[in-house]
């Protein structure tokens, strides 16, 4: 009896037909990732996972020469968006976050809540067991405790080129390890406000070593992350999911709840009821928006998988345009 044909591996989004709408969608995702990379309490890596950019980015950086042109064309709008997100946050959004940081952070927490069902399904695509739930729980508890302890350990570090390089490496680590918020640690070291000011003022003594640190860290660790996904997909993804859950929960006691204290209310100029209502409204808006977005993405994903199943081709070798034409 002949062996059944192997099930084709899902095609990377890098290999799919592109369009102007998808180009601008990736630009918008890049902006969100850029903001998340330097926004206290959030992780650019978490948003990259939510928007479906994490896995293709890790695989590209782990093997830069493979499908180089397609990867570059795919990530150009993402890179532009990340730059716009960082610059826009530093120059414009920072003012709003000075007064309403907790409330706008709730918007991003809503993004995580709304997309959690799709992230959970993604983590279980190759099956899950009790061990994987244990990994999820341990990762969630670990990052939760780490963020709580870090919130009480403020240390002042004198800025310098090596320090900014290390800060960039920390931001890069936040991209590789979703759930880790580099900005929180920069705040603990007394560097966050100086970094935001340097980016806003286009101080290349800050920007260049910061960028080099990000690139160096990501390139060094990307291959290891890709290796884990290839061999331990379920375990690696449930670890990431746990980091997302734990870091999101830790944002409430470290960032959100202080806004409801007397000092926080004085800084925002809101009453307790107004502050809570504002935070809840932002949370609801973020949750609904991301849930609707994930539903659209899921429909597109199901249609794409049906095309691939009918084509029954090697996704890394087959031209995606040929797939679309043949079907």
Image: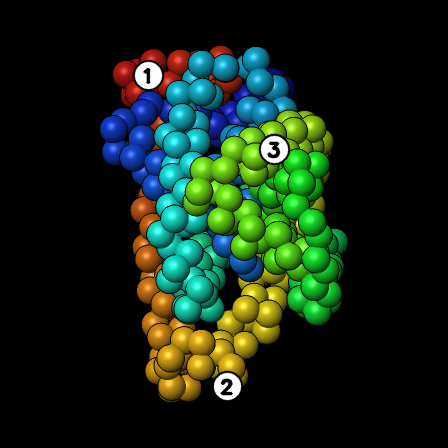
Please tell me whether mark 3 or mark 1 is closer to you in this view. 3
Q: Position of residue 208 (x, y in %)?
A: 56, 31
Q: In the image, which disc is placed on residue 262? A: 2
The location of residue 127, given as percent across then percent down, is 62, 46
State the residue at coordinates (70%, 57%). Answer: 156
Residue 293 appears in view: yes
How packed mark 3 is, by other alpha carbons closer than 10 Å (few <14, some 14-19, many 20 or more), is: many
Secondary structure of the residue carrying tag 3 is helix
**Image position of 40 with respect to 307: above or below:** below
Q: Quadrant of residue 225?
A: top right
Residue 25: give x, y in percent of width and height: 32, 38
Closer to the eye: label 2 or 1: 2
Which residue is pictured at 48% across the width and 42% down the height?
Answer: 199
Residue picked out by circle 1: 321
Residue 209, numbered circle: 3
Give the farthest residue toward the left: 20
Q: In this view, does 42 lie to the left or right of 180?
A: left
Above or below residue 33? Residue 23 is: above
Tell me: 103 left or right of 68: left
Colour scheme in use: rainbow
Measured Cα–Cα span from mark 2 to mark 3: 39 Å
Q: What element carries label 2?
A: helix
Out of 102 and 142, give the one closest to the viewer. 102
Residue at 44% x, 58% y: name it: 108
The secondary element bearing badge 1 is classed as: helix
């Amino acid at each position: 009896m002949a062996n059944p044909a192997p099930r084709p591996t899902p095609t990377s989004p890098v290999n799919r037909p592109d369009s102007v709408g998808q180009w601008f969608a990736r630009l918008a995702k890049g902006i969100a990732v850029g903001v998340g990379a330097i926004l206290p309490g959030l992780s650019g890596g978490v948003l990259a996972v939510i928007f479906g950019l994490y896995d293709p980015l890790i695989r590209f950086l782990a093997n830069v020469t493979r499908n180089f042109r397609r990867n570059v064309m795919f990530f150009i709008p993402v890179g532009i968006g990340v730059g716009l997100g960082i610059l826009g946050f530093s120059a414009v959004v920072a003012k709003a976050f000075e007064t309403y940081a907790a409330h706008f952070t709730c918007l991003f927490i809503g993004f995580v809540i709304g997309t959690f069902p799709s992230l959970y399904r993604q983590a279980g695509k190759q099956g899950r067991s009790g061990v994987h739930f244990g990994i999820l729980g341990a990762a969630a508890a670990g990052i939760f405790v780490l963020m709580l302890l870090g919130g009480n350990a403020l240390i002042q570090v004198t800025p310098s080129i090596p320090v900014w390089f290390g800060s960039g490496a920390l931001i890069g680590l936040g991209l590789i390890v979703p759930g880790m918020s580099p900005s929180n640690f920069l705040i603990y070291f007394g560097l966050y406000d100086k970094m935001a000011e340097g980016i806003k003022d286009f101080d290349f003594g800050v920007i260049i070593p910061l960028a080099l640190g990000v690139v160096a860290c990501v390139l060094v660790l990307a291959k290891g992350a890709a290796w884990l996904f290839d061999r331990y997909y379920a375990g690696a993804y449930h670890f990431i999911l746990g980091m997302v859950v734990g870091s999101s929960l830790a944002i409430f006691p470290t960032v959100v709840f202080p806004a409801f204290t007397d000092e926080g209310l004085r800084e925002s100029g809101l009453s307790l009821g107004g502050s809570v209502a504002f935070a809840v409204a932002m949370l609801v808006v973020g949750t609904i928006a991301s849930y609707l977005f994930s539903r659209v993405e899921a429909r597109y994903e199901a249609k794409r998988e049906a095309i691939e199943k009918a084509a029954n081709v090697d996704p890394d070798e087959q031209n995606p345009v040929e797939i679309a034409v043949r079907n």
